[in-house]
Image: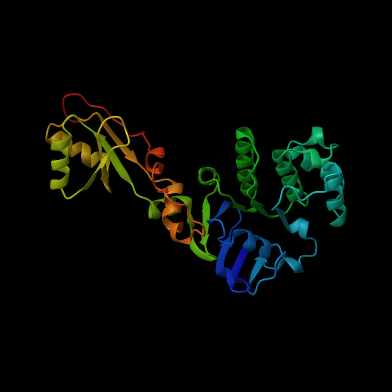
Amino acid sequence: MIELRGLTKVYGPTKAVDDLSFTVKPGIVTGFLGPNGAGKSTTMRMILGLDQPTSGAALIEGKPYRELKTPLRTVGALLDAKWVHPNRSARAHLQWMAASNGIPKSRVDEVLGLVGLSEVAGKKAGGFSLGMSQRLGLAGALLGDPKVLLFDEPVNGLDPEGIVWIRKFMQRLAAEGRTVLVSSHLLSEMALTAEQLVVIGRGRLISDSTVAEFVDRSSESTVRVRSPQLDVLRSVLLSQGLTVREDGSGVAPALVVVDSTTDVIGGLAGSQGIVLYELASQQGSLEDAFMKLTGDDVQYHASGIDPGVGAHHANTQQANTQQAMGGAL
């Protein structure tokens, strides 16, 4: 388990981390999200004893990192995939790490096999691609068979197959009862990987909840509907006090109804004999929710771009799409 208690880090006039408190529990993958400059890397470095907090505490299994007698056996981390001597082989890199923590040499070949690097174990790490370096960094994190794991952008440089592999790999590690904290900018991947989310902005805690709770609380659920009798349908929906807006993103005109359901809208259309060509629920995405909650905490804003444009329809769920000709659904 990882526990943060009022963790604060100040650099001159800048408060990089501001009274941050949360707990990362074992048995699930916890995503650690925030805009650039939010303080994620600084927080992870303080957890690992690489930076000293100005105040507060970061505990791993109830102790600060510096009090761990054999750190690699308690916590493993991947913060920088290129943190390796370029002229050492992958095996030699892991062997010196093992020797420094009293870990048997046999464990080196075990972790190389776990991450799929057995065939290149004798090659110099300096010649590795970023994806192979990520795998080597994972092997180093797993060397001591630790209960706690921290990964910073672990899918960087991986191809689609590698991304799926590491997603399942992290989920398996959590299923074994380990504590897994993952920082990533790939929100779509975090939505598939993590169960719990910790979101920070400008060093402060914004949210600590499950992925589903975060999305439900912070994004908009709507229903998209198409009909050859769109004006009549709009009047019916408005007469029931529903919020309706135009949806011009598709080829054919459509309406978007906020905070309603396909059952309600289909029932209203059927009662008035209105033909529907499409009736689809649209659930907000993790990206939608993240942009909404962290918009004020982004350190560098680009001009001329609305971050919400395009996200809404990219995440449309068509599972409830129904078609009807000549009457009610």
The residue under the point 86% across, 49% down is 104
Where is the N terminus found, in terms of image quarters? bottom right
The answer, for residue 213, to whether it is visible in the render is: no
Task: In the displayed orientation, state which residue is furthest to the top.
Answer: 325
- Would residue 320 appear left or right of 175 to someone viewing this image? left
**Whether residue 323 is situated above or below residue 260 in the rendered picture:** above
Number of marks in the image? 0
Q: Residue furthest front?
A: 303
Name which residue lies at 60% across and 34% down.
160
Q: Residue at x 12, y 31 (%)?
A: 273
The answer to whether residue 202 is left or right of residue 165 is left
Asked if residue 274 shows in the view, the reply is: yes
Quadrant location of the C terminus?
A: top left
Q: Is residue 143 left or right of residue 248?
A: right
Q: Position of residue 121 (x, y in %)?
A: 83, 37
Residue 22 versus residue 224: which sits nearer the camera?
224
Q: Quadrant of residue 186?
A: top right
Residue 60: image x %, image y %?
Answer: 68, 63
In front of the other: 210 or 254 = 254
Give percent across and percent down for residue 191: 50, 45
Q: Position of residue 306 (x, y in %)?
A: 40, 48
| Residue reaching furthest to the bottom | 55
Residue at screen point 76% across, 65% down: 68
**In which image quadrant can residue 253 be found?**
top left
Q: How is the image coloured?
A: rainbow
Q: Identify which residue, 59 or 286, lies in the foreground.
A: 286
